[in-house]
Image (cartoon, rainbow, N blue to C red):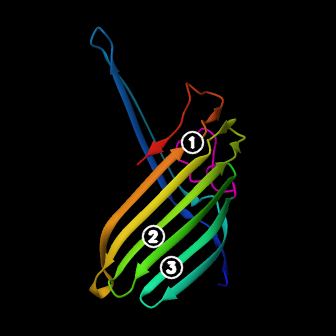
Amino acid sequence: VDGRLALGAVIPYGRVEVDAQASASTPGGLALGVSKSDGVTDFGDPALAASIGWKRRDGDLFRAWSLYTSLFIPVGSYELGRIANIGANRWGLDLGTAFTMGNFKRGREFSGVLGVTFNGENADTDYRSGTDLHLELTYKQHLPMGLSAGLVGYYYQQLTADSGSNLLGDFKGRVA
């Protein structure tokens, strides 16, 4: 089974808007509040990607799998002190694998991606986000006219804590 090489690049462009509000009351009943808004339209951090993939078809059964890597380059719009930033101002490297299993006769598909992202340090803030693991899964039934219905799942687990200045504790993200 021969592998196929794919190379790619992404140069993101978009808009980020942030509106934040906080309020509290003193024991005497005095209400205190603060709000801040920010927005930016610009380029984000570009990414370079490479993958090698294989596929196999046996009658109505289809299998495909790949290994991939993405490199995130910190040259996008970032400004220290701005709360709306499109760029992360840090290097990142994502390594992973992806697969798809399908049955053309029944129109069913099961796909997934498992990856690990290594994050560099933002030199302007002396802050490094931890290494994370991410898993995406999809099970769907293909329908007529290009439609499909199914289930999609996502799991994210930060494997190592953030590090750097201004930490109030061991920050580790998790989402399911």
Disc on the earlier residue, 2 or 1: 1
Front residue of 152 and 146: 152
Relative to 57, 151 lies left or right: left
Q: CA distance from mark 2 to mark 1?
A: 38 Å
Counting other residues with Cα less than 10 Å from the Cα at mark 1, is it few (<14), some (14-19), or many (20 or more)? Answer: few
Q: Classify residue 123 as left or right of residue 176.
A: right
Which residue does the numbered mark 3 point to in the structure image?
63
Q: Nearer the viewer, residue 123 or 56?
A: 56
User: Counting residues from the N terminus, which is met first, the one under dot 3 or under dot 1?
Assistant: 3
Residue name at image x 72 percent, y 41 percent:
123
Spot occupied by residue 76 in the image (x, y as percentages of width and height): 65, 56
Image location of residue 33, percent across then percent down: 37, 25
Kind of residue indicated by mark 1:
Arg
Q: Is residue 103 left or right of residue 170?
A: left
Q: Residue furthest right?
A: 123
Q: Which dot, 3 or 1, sits closer to the camera?
A: 3
Q: Is residue 88 magenta?
A: yes
Image quarter of residue 20: top left
Q: Decide whether the magenta segment is chiefly helix, strand or loop.
A: loop
Residue ID at (33%, 64%): 151
The amino acid type, in three-letter code, at marker 2 is: Ser
Segment tinted magenta in the rendering: 73-89
Q: Considering only vertical position in the picture, is 139 above or below 85?
A: below
Residue 65 picture quarter:
bottom right
Task: Give the mark nearer the N terminus: 3 vs 2.
Answer: 3
Residue 136 locus on image (x, y percent): 46, 60
Q: Decide whether residue 27 is among the magenta residues.
A: no
- Pointer 1 residue: 82
